[in-house]
Amino acid sequence: MSYRIVVDFDLCESNAICMQVAPEVFEVRDDDFLYILDETPGEDLRAKVDEAVQRCPKQAISIAEG
């Protein structure tokens, strides 16, 4: 089952918790903005992405299935 990462950048504080959990997918750069390195990561990263979604303090990250 494929999925896509969705970030509400209006809510995102770029606190980098998601980057700590899944650095293959998320990156906060020197400009203090969050970048999604891979919007459609493989199932091998799904557990990390799920954890990043759960740990986001602003609930700015979600997953769109399909």
Image (cartoon, helix red, strand yellow):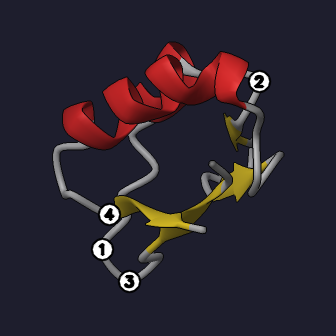
Which element is circle 2 on?
A: loop
Instruction: Compare residues 28 and 59 and report the one nearer the observer.
Output: 59
Q: Choose mark 2 or mark 1, whichever is in front.
A: 2
Q: CA distance from mark 1 to mark 4?
A: 5 Å
Contact (CB < 8 A) between labels 3 and 1? yes
**Mark 1 is on which residue type?**
Leu
Q: Choose mark 1 or mark 4, whichever is in front.
A: 4
Q: CA distance from mark 3 to mark 1?
A: 4 Å
Contact (CB < 8 A) between labels 1 and 4? yes
What residue occupies the far front of the structure in this picture?
Answer: 1
Q: Which residue is mark 3?
A: 10
Label whose residue precedes the other's in the sequence (2 or 3) = 3
Q: Which residue is mark 1?
A: 11
Q: Is residue 31 left or right of residue 47?
A: right
Label whose residue precedes the other's in the sequence (4 or 3) = 3
Pointer 4 local density, CA inside 10 Å: few below 14, some 14–19, many at least 20:
some
Q: CA distance from mark 2 to mark 1?
A: 22 Å
Contact (CB < 8 A) between labels 2 and 3? no
Which element is circle 4 on?
A: loop
Label whose residue precedes the other's in the sequence (2 or 1) = 1
